[in-house]
C-alpha cells in the first residue's frame, strides 16, 4: 500500500521561505510522477506543480500562478518529495497536499497525503 | 492553462435524491476528466477517473459521463455518507481543478 505523509508546515512570516516534505512508503519516487496541490481555507483545490518520474526525464512543471517562487524536488535515495516556497505571501496560507499518478497512463491522483497546514502571517 | 468550471457551487439535497454536478472545461480535454470526493478535514479521494471509470471500492450509485468540454457526475440515490465536496480535475494538459461543489443535506 502506498502512503504519503507531509511535514514541515507551520506559522511563517511574509517574505520568509519554507520547505515542505512528503515521505513516501510503498512507492519508489523515482518511478512516479509526483504533484503538489494546495487548498486555501474554504476554497477549492489548486494544482501547484509536478516532477516527472526519472524514466520520463524528471522534469518539473508549475502552475503559472506559482512559477518562479515554488520549487519541487525529490531525493530518490530516501523517497522524499520536497516543495520549497520562497517569498511567502499571505495568500499562500493553505493546506498543502502531495499526491501521485504513480505509473498510470492517465493523470488521476491516488493516493494523497493527509496535508500540511501553512499559515503565513505577520 | 485549461480552466475548469463546476456548477453548482453548492447544492442541498435529501437522502434518496438523485443529484447531478456539472464540470465544464475551457477547451477540449477528450475524456481526461477525474472526480474526487472530499470530506471536511480530510484529503480528497479519487472517485471516478477518465470520465466514467469508478475507482475500486466506489459504490455503483456514482456515475460519470461526458467528453470534450462538458462532463457530469451523478449520484443516483444519495446516502448520508455522500454529503461532501466534489472536485473535478482535468489531466489533458498538465492538471487543473474545478472550484468544487459542496453537497449539503436539505
Image (tube, coloured by chain):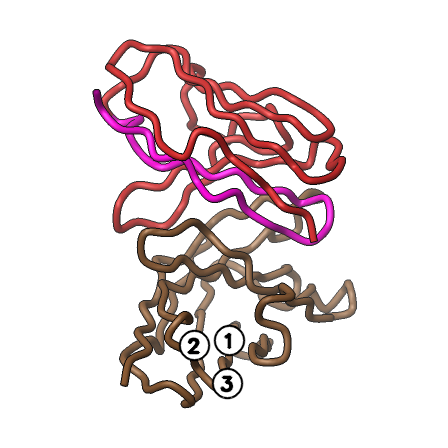
In the image, the chain rendered in red is B
SS of the residue under disc 3: loop
Pointer 2 and pointer 3 on the same chain: yes
In the rendering, which numbered label is found on residue A86?
3
| Rendering coords of residue A14 (x, y %) | 37, 85
- The quadrant the C terminus of chain A occupies is bottom left
Residue that label 2 marks: A20
Residue A102: give its label: none
Query: Picture coordinates of residue B77 (x, y %)?
Result: 34, 11
Q: Secondary structure at mark 1?
A: strand
First to last magenta residue range: B81-106
Q: On what subunit does the disc labeled 2 rest?
A: A
**Residue B103 located within the stretch drawn in magenta:** yes
In the depicted structure, whether residue A105 falls above or below residue A100: above
Q: Is residue A75 left or right of residue B28?
A: left
Instruction: Tell me if residue B97 is in the magenta stretch.
Output: yes
> Is there one chain holding both mark 1 and mark 3?
yes
Q: Which residue is mark 1?
A: A83
Count of numbered tags = 3
Q: Are marks 2 and 1 in contact (CB under 8 Å)?
A: yes
Amino acid at each position: 500500500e502506498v502512503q504519503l505523509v507531509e511535514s514541515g508546515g507551520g506559522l511563517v512570516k511574509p517574505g520568509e521561505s519554507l520547505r515542505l516534505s512528503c515521505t513516501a512508503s510503498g512507492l519508489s519516487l523515482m518511478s512516479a510522477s509526483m504533484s503538489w496541490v494546495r487548498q486555501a481555507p474554504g476554497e477549492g483545490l489548486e494544482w501547484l506543480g509536478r516532477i516527472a518520474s526519472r524514466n520520463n526525464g524528471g522534469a518539473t512543471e508549475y502552475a503559472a500562478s506559482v512559477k518562479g517562487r515554488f520549487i519541487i524536488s525529490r531525493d530518490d535515495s530516501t523517497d522524499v518529495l520536497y516543495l520549497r516556497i520562497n517569498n511567502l505571501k499571505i495568500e499562500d496560507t493553505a493546506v498543502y497536499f502531495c499526491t501521485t499518478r504513480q505509473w498510470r497512463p492517465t493523470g488521476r491522483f491516488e493516493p494523497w497525503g493527509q496535508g500540511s497546514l501553512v499559515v503565513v502571517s505577520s | 492553462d485549461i480552466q475548469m468550471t463546476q456548477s453548482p457551487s453548492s447544492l442541498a439535497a435529501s437522502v434518496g435524491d438523485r443529484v447531478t454536478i456539472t464540470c465544464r472545461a475551457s477547451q477540449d480535454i477528450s475524456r481526461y476528466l477525474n472526480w474526487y470526493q472530499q470530506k471536511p478535514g480530510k484529503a480528497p479521494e479519487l472517485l471516478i477517473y477518465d470520465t466514467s471509470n469508478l475507482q475500486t471500492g466506489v459504490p455503483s450509485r456514482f456515475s460519470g459521463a461526458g467528453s470534450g468540454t462538458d462532463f457530469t457526475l451523478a449520484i443516483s440515490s444519495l446516502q448520508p455518507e455522500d454529503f461532501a465536496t466534489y472536485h473535478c480535475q482535468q489531466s489533458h494538459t498538465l492538471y487543473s481543478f474545478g472550484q468544487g461543489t459542496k453537497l449539503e443535506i436539505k
